[in-house]
């Protein structure tokens, strides 16, 4: 669940700071918080996720603003529990 929440906050911060989406997929409202179904399907049942777990996407396609936003979210929320 922590990954889902970090993705959610990254999207929210990007919408506020950069006025653009990081991705176009919509979140679903689940009992334990917002979920991206594609992320859920790729890491279902895993307690630790490595960056190479996700076959789609390339970090080289991110802009500097997007990287800064994601890094800020990780710095702010990364050490918190889900």
Image (spheres, grey):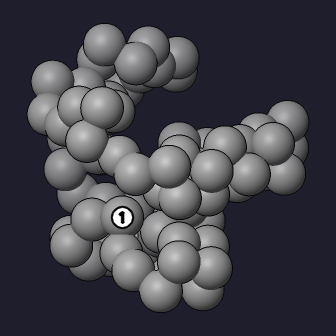
How many circles with numbers are drawn on the protein?
Answer: 1
Residue 8: percent from the left, percent from the top? 51, 65
Q: Is residue 65 above or below residue 14?
A: above
Q: Residue furthest left?
A: 56
- Asked if one can make out residue 1 in the rendered structure from this viewpoint, the answer is no
Does residue 71 appear left or right of residue 31 in this picture? Answer: right
- Asked if one can make out residue 71 in the rendered structure from this viewpoint, the answer is yes
Near-viewer residue (70 or 49): 70
Dot 1 lies on which element?
loop
Q: Residue at x 40, y 51 (%)?
A: 63
| Residue 5 found in image quarter | bottom right
Residue 72: percent from the left, percent from the top? 74, 51
Q: Residue at x 47, y 86 (%)?
A: 19
Q: Which residue is mark 1?
A: 22
Q: Residue at x 25, y 41 (%)?
A: 61
Residue 10: percent from the left, percent from the top? 55, 61
Does residue 16 appear left or right of residue 51 in this picture? Answer: right
Residue 18: percent from the left, percent from the top? 53, 78
Q: Is residue 52 above or below residue 73?
A: above
Q: Residue at x 52, y 17 (%)?
A: 48
* 10 Å crowding of disc 1: few (<14), some (14-19), many (20+): many
């Amino acid at each position: 669940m922590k990954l889902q929440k970090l993705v959610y906050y990254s999207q929210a911060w990007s919408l506020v700071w950069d006025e653009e989406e990081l991705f176009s997929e919509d979140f679903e409202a689940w009992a334990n918080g917002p979920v991206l179904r594609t992320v859920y399907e790729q890491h279902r049942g895993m307690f630790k996720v490595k960056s190479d777990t996700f076959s789609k996407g390339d970090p080289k396609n991110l802009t500097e603003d997007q990287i800064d936003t994601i890094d800020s979210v990780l710095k702010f929320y990364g050490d918190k529990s889900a």
